[in-house]
Image (cartoon, rainbow, N blue to C red):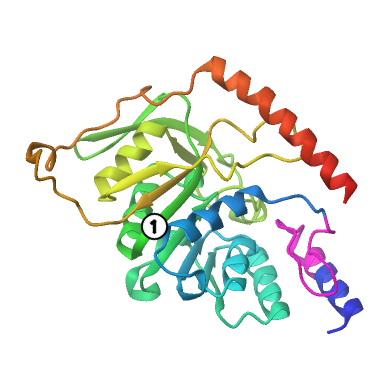
Amino acid sequence: MDKNELLEQIGNLKRSYGDWGYDIPLSFGIRTNENQNIPHTRLKRIVQIVNDLVDKPLSKCRILDLGCLDGMFAIEFAQHGAETIGVEIREANIKKAIFCKEVLHLNNLEFRQEDARNISIESYGMFDAIICSGLLYHLAASDAIELIAKMFEMSRKIVIIDTHVALKPKTAFKKGSDAYWGVLYREHSQNDSQAIKTKRLWASYDNNESFWFTRPSLINILNKTGFTSVYECFTPIHLNFGKPGIESFDRCSFVAIKGKQCNLVTSPSANDLYEKWSEKSLEYSTTKVKAAKVFLKKIIEKFRKLIKLK
């Protein structure tokens, strides 16, 4: 299609399905969200993590992007040559994602309209990296734990969970003999219809309340699931461009590695040791948080100036 046809199609999709979530570059210098030119630092972080930690080039990887919205993360991995599947439950998002895929002629990219809670190794297979960004905190506690177990089973190497965490352990969710702490987060009112919930593209699809785990509880879940090591990523840094300070201090990027247990020779008593992080043991100090806000505000101002110069 030519430039005018492309603009018309983008406009038609917006009129039919609402605003685009991401500013995805297509042909003729056209982007889906009116060329905002805002650096997507979370995308940079996640792609860099995968590039650093998988033991093969991205072009040889198989990537799963859960809750992919209109597809930017999946499209980025596909453009690096990775065989990529994006999973998204809402028709409004999946229509836009498929449109971008077709415009960009990405034959190594597939989008499936499905509830991410229904993924299985039987229907999707194994992946070198699984991306769960902006999804886990839209789920009930039991669904989140079950999804983590599925991602563990389907991952060859790494799972990246970019999610909100609860800063205070207010509510406990019990699973067997374990208690995981967090807060309940209101997504919809009890009287909202499914049609209303579906239109809220940045909210849960069906549950009225979601569960945000605390940082210690989420790490304990990943540990109990079987991941051999878990890390929190700080570089590449993710900023909330257009607003002062970091996006939020309750939004974190965790990297869970599915490796082989390495047993010690000189300290065998450590091999079968299982410990849990206690609540409040991983809190950031208030003083450091305030200092970080000031520092990051200065960084954002510098980036704003650079963007204006371009």
The picture quadrant where one finds residue 90 is bottom right
In this rendering, position of residue 18 left or right of residue 250: right
Q: Quadrant of residue 15?
A: bottom right
Q: Nearer the viewer, residue 157 or 278?
A: 157
Under circle 1, the secondary element is strand
In the image, residue 102 lies at what x, y percent?
69, 80
Q: Is residue 191 magenta?
A: no
The percent position of residue 285, horizontal first and vertical second, equals 49, 18
Residue 147 percent coordinates (x, y): 38, 54
Question: Magenta includes 33?
Answer: yes
Q: Range of the magenta residues?
A: 13-35
Residue at position x 79%, y 36% in the image: 302
Q: As displayed, is residue 111 above or below residue 142? A: below
**Amino acid type, mark 1:** Ile
Q: Which residue is mark 1?
A: 158
Could you tell me which residue is drawn at 34 percent across and 59 percent down?
150
* Residue 48 vs residue 197, the one in the foreground: 48
Judged from this view, the residue extending furthest toward the front is 266
